Amino acid sequence: IGESILSDRQECGALLKKILEINPFFLRSYRNEEPSSLRLNTFLAKLSAVIDMTYRHLITPPAPLFPTFYSERVIFHFYLIKNHNNYDPLGPDYFNFKEFKHEMSKFKLPSQEYTFSMKQLELSTDPSIAVGLVRSMSLAKVPVLSVYGQFHVQTILQISSKSLRSYIHTFEPETGLDELYEDDSSDISIVKHVPIYFFSLHSLEPVFIDKYYLSKALHDMVIVVQSNHTWESRIACNRRPIYWNLRNPLKSSLASTALMLGGIVPTHIRYNEVHQSACQDWFWSVGDNPL
């Protein structure tokens, strides 16, 4: 028995010696060097990082966040609703409707047809819309951190997108906003309706949707808000704050409309499956993109 054990040990020793000669990552040092298991894990971790970075550089991430259906015709219903005569919502330095149509047309396939329609409404002549808007509004205090590290609080007006959506559906029969829902028998593969409700407001405080946004895409509509203010954003460059032009929510409205149209998000936004949340990835944020 002792001789068989001794021969088995000799065979195992010879086999281990061959493995160490072939694969240096299994080398073990008994003095000051790291053990072989730690070396192997470190190598595999670095290799995984290289493969992941290469994958993200060579393969374009998927753009749609959810499955979308092809429609031969897409109709954009743009409703401009305002409560003032202080400025022209579509004037110079304000919202450019022609530019909006031009940028949205970049998403059109050769076999598709895009149609844009605009209808203007006054809150003074439509009390139902005014009541719904006022009931969806509330004052909010937003903490702001300046570029110099100082905290201060700013008062804003915020619109609840869910509440306003419910009011919009209630006042559609009274104002004629239900035109796009008249033909319920239309096939979604033929015609797709995209209603956009653009609220141009005059107020002493800046107006946002859900406290932080200038537009919001819901499953059946897009809500955009415009106010005659500039806003110091949370982004700074070279210790200088970057201001948002709340008079011209073009970029935000494009992003929300593209999200409702086909689940398209800006090129620097992607979905993190591990954390199940949105994150920023600037690898593919290049080129001519409407967003």
Image (cartoon, rainbow, N blue to C red):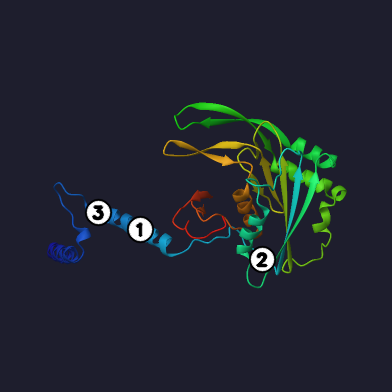
Q: Residue 237 appears at what percent x and percent y?
A: 44, 40
Residue type marked 2? Phe
Q: Is residue 114 left or right of residue 230?
A: right
Q: Residue 222 appears at what percent x and percent y?
A: 69, 51
Instruction: Give the residue pinned by disc 1.
Output: 48
Residue type marked 1? Ser
Residue type marked 3? Arg
Instruction: Identify which residue, 1 or 9, lies in the foreground.
Output: 9
Circle 2 sits in a helix, a strand or a loop, which is it?
loop
N-terminal label among 3 and 2: 3
Q: Which mark is in front, 3 or 2?
A: 2
Residue visible at 59% across and 50% down in the picture: 251
Residue visible at 41% across and 39% down in the picture: 238
Residue visible at 53% across and 31% down in the picture: 144
Dot 3 surroundings within 10 Å: few (below 14), some, or many (20 or more)? some
Q: Number of marks in the image?
A: 3
Instruction: Give the residue pinned by disc 2.
Output: 69
Residue visible at 62% across and 50% down in the picture: 250
N-terminal label among 2 and 1: 1
Instruction: Give the residue pinned by disc 3.
Output: 39
Q: Residue 230 appears at what percent x and percent y?
A: 59, 37
